[in-house]
Structures are given as C-alpha cells and as structure tokens.
Amino acid sequence: MLPTPEQIKHYIEAGLACEHVAVEGDGQHFFATIVSEQFAGKRLIARHQLVYAALGDRMKAEIHALSMKTLTPAEYQAQ
C-alpha cells in the first residue's frame, strides 16, 4: 500500500522535533517542507540526513521519492 502525505508527515514528526511540516504527493513522489530548530548550523546534506533518519527503513520500503526543503524557524519566517 502506498503511503499518503499525512502518513509521511506523521513519520517525520515522530522522529524529528519540528515546528512545521507540510507534505504533498501522489503516493510515489512527495515534496516536504520541514522546519526544525535541529537544522540550525547544519549544511543541507546534514539536514536531509536528519529527515532520512526519522523516516528510517520507510525510505527503502514505502517512500520511493522525497524532495524536501529543510529550514530553521528563522529561515522559514524570512521567506
């Protein structure tokens, strides 16, 4: 069964302290905007690794494609 955007959002929030998570997708391809203080001082790759760690094995089994925008709360407010 293909995951829904709401399920992906729940998986991320369960594994990473977030101020905001929004996920869009069609069951195979997803785009997430994730705002977390844990991203502060980290490069893009380290931010993405935090999200992948939160998703765990679901990235291999359930989620086939995930694009993401990872922001600190200050970066998010500046948009």
Image (cartoon, rainbow, N blue to C red):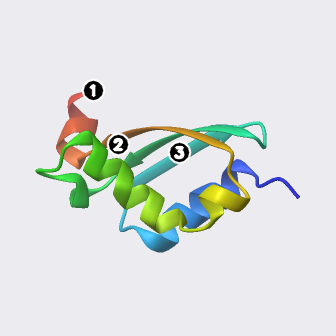
Alpha-carbon neighbours of circle 3 within 10 Å: few (<14), some, or many (≥20)? some
Give the foreground label among 1 and 2: 2
Residue marked by disc 1? 79
User: Quick one: SS at disc 3?
Assistant: strand
Q: Which residue is rendered at x = 19% and y = 43% of the image?
A: 43
- Say whether residue 19 is visible: no
**Three-letter amino acid code at the position of disc 1:** Gln
Name which of mark 2 and mark 3 comes first in the sequence.
3
Q: CA distance from mark 3 to mark 1?
A: 15 Å
Horizontal side of 2 relative to 8 (left or right) equals right
Horizontal side of 49 relative to 23 (left or right) equals left
Of residues 4 and 48, the one nearer the viewer is 48
Q: Position of residue 14 (x, y in %)?
A: 50, 73
Alpha-carbon neighbours of circle 1 within 10 Å: few (<14), some, or many (≥20)? few
Residue marked by disc 2? 70
Alpha-carbon neighbours of circle 2 within 10 Å: few (<14), some, or many (≥20)? many
- Image quadrant of residue 74? top left
Q: CA distance from mark 2 to mark 3?
A: 11 Å
- Image quadrant of residue 29? top right
Q: Are marks 1 and 2 in contact (CB under 8 Å)?
A: no
Give the foreground label among 2 and 3: 2
Name which of mark 3 and mark 1 comes first in the sequence.
3
Query: Hey, which residue is sitting farthest top in the picture?
Result: 79
* Disc number placed over residue 22 in the picture, else none: 3
Q: CA distance from mark 1 to mark 2?
A: 12 Å
User: Would you place residue 26 above or below residue 35 in this image?
Assistant: above
**Three-letter amino acid code at the position of disc 3:** Ala
User: Quick one: SS at disc 2?
Assistant: strand
Which quadrant holds the N terminus? bottom right
